[in-house]
Amino acid sequence: MKKIIILFSSLLTFTTLFYSINSHAAFGGKSPFYVEPYAGYFIGKLESDDIIDGDIKSLYYGARIGIETARGYIFGFDYGQGNGDFDADNSSNSDGDYEQKDLGAFIGYRINPMVRIYGSYIFKFEAEYDRDNNTDFDIEGDGFNAGISIKAAPKLKIGLEYQIRNYKEFGNGTNIPGSDDKSTTYLLTFKLPVPMPFNIR
């Protein structure tokens, strides 16, 4: 993962230098840097061959940081985390707390001043299930996001996102034997401008 982070960091640096003059002119003197904090709520489902199935629901917050080119393309890093509940399908004593952390890279495109679409590859996904029956377990893996963001008001954007998380191994490094272990969720987010020393789009 260290090589991936170095690669994306180098790519961000190069592209920032390459596009900074055009972006600066195209945006009327504003910075090409892109920062988008967000907060919301997701609901979804864990479906697995080897782990107990159930419903997931959680508050979720994070930020996307990157650059926007003069042609409306946006890319950078995406980080989010959530804290919520897990409701098992077959037994109430398997219910418990759920925590999720995601780190990835995203690319987006501004269709017009009101609408933006984007996708993320999550190369580092971690989840913790703290169940009431004391059979806790940690999960690691990867995943994908696909979403749309609409400016509903001058200072408010609403986003809808579809998330897939692939469960690859347990926290102790043991591989999960099943071939179809994943969670799917739908995330609704609200995004408000935050004062920063550079432009936020």
Image: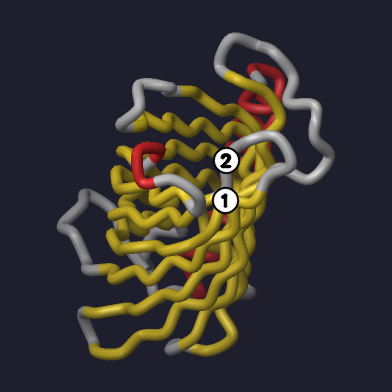
Residue 195 position in % (x across, y down): 15, 57
Q: Reading the chain from its start, which is encountered first: label 1 or label 2? A: 1
Residue 157 badge: none
Residue 22 shows in this picture: no
Residue 77 shows in this picture: yes
Residue 50 position in % (x across, y down): 70, 34
The residue indicated by pointer 2 is: 52
Query: Element at badge 2?
Result: loop
Could you tell me the amino acid type at mark 2?
Ile
Residue 130 position in % (x across, y down): 35, 29
Residue that appears at 43% across and 66% down: 187
- Mark 1 and mark 2: Cα distance apart in space: 8 Å
Between 193 and 170, the residue placed more toward the observer is 170
Residue that appears at 35% across and 27% down: 133
Instruction: Tell me the crowding category of disc 2: few under 14, some 14 to 19, or many 20 or more residues within 10 angstroms, Cα based.
Output: some
Residue 2 falls in image quadrant: top right
The single residue placed furthest to the top in the displayed view is: 172
Quadrant of the drawing holding the N terminus: top right
Task: Determine contact: label 1, label 2, CB under 8 Å.
Answer: yes
Between 194 and 19, the residue placed more toward the observer is 194
Between 137 and 32, the residue placed more toward the observer is 137
In this rendering, is residue 18 above or below 68? above
The single residue placed furthest to the right in the displayed view is: 179
- Which of discs 1 and 2 lies nearer the camera? The answer is 2
Instruction: Tell me the crowding category of disc 1: few under 14, some 14 to 19, or many 20 or more residues within 10 angstroms, Cα based.
Output: many
Residue that appears at 45% across and 48% down: 88
Residue 159 position in % (x across, y down): 41, 75
Residue 46 badge: 1
The single residue placed furthest to the left in the displayed view is: 195
In this rendering, is residue 120 above or below 23? above
Could you tell me the amino acid type at mark 1?
Leu
